Image (tube, rainbow, N blue to C red):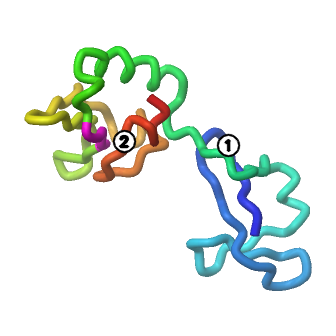
Amino acid sequence: MSKYKTGDRFVIELEKEVDPGMFKVKGFNALVFDESGLDRLAKVDGSKVEILDKVEKRYLSAVIKPWRDRVIHIAKMSFNMGKKEHLSITIKGDDIYLPEFGPNTMYQGMELDRGYTLEELGL
C-alpha cells in the first residue's frame, strides 16, 4: 500500500485496509488510521526519507572530510545505562567517537546501534 511521512523524518506504511476507511500500519499490531486522518500526512512516493537534518549533515560532513574515503559506517550508540548517547564513526583501521549528548536530543532519525553508510545518511 502507500507510504506517508509524519513530521520531518518518520514514515508509516499502510499495510492493508482492515475496515472501510480504516488501515493497519505496518509494524504495529493495533494501530489503525481513519482515512480522513491521512490528509494531515505527506505521501511519500518512493523517495527516501532524510535521516539527518541540514545542521547534522553539515556538521558530520565537516567532521568526516579528512577520512571520507575511509569511512565504513556511522552509528548512534547508547551508553551509561541509556543516559547518554554519542556517534561512533568507524573508518578503516580505527574508530572516532564524537562528544556525548542526551538521549533522543540529537540525530533523532538514526536508530541506536545501527551502522549507516554515508549514502544512507545523505553524506
Looking at the picture, how far across and down is residue 2, in whole percent?
A: 76, 63
Q: For the residue carrying disc 1, how many other residues have a C-alpha within 10 Å: few (<14), some (14-19), or many (20+)? A: few
In space, the residues marked 2 and 1 are separated at their CA atoms by 24 Å
Image quadrant for the C terminus?
A: top left
Q: Picture quarter containing residue 56? A: top left
Residue 15 placement, left or right of 96: right
Q: In the displayed image of the protein, which residue is found farthest to the front?
A: 69
Identity of the amino acid at label 1? Gly
Q: Is residue 76 above or below residue 58?
A: below
Label 2: few (<14), some or many (≥20) within 10 Å? some
Give the label on residue 117, or none.
2
Q: Which residue has dot 1 on it? A: 7
Describe the element under mark 1 as helix, strand or loop. loop
On the image, the x and y values in percent for residue 110 come to 42, 44
- Taking the magenta stretch, the answer to whether it contains residue 73 is yes
User: Which residue is depicted at the point 31% across and 48% down?
Assistant: 115
Q: Quadrant of the N terminus?
A: bottom right
Residue 73 percent across, percent down from the top left: 29, 41
Quadrant for residue 76, please give it.
Answer: top left
- Depth check, front residue: 60 or 28: 60
Which secondary structure, mark 2?
loop
**What segment carries the magenta color?**
72-76
Q: Nearer the viewer, mark 2 or mark 1?
A: 2
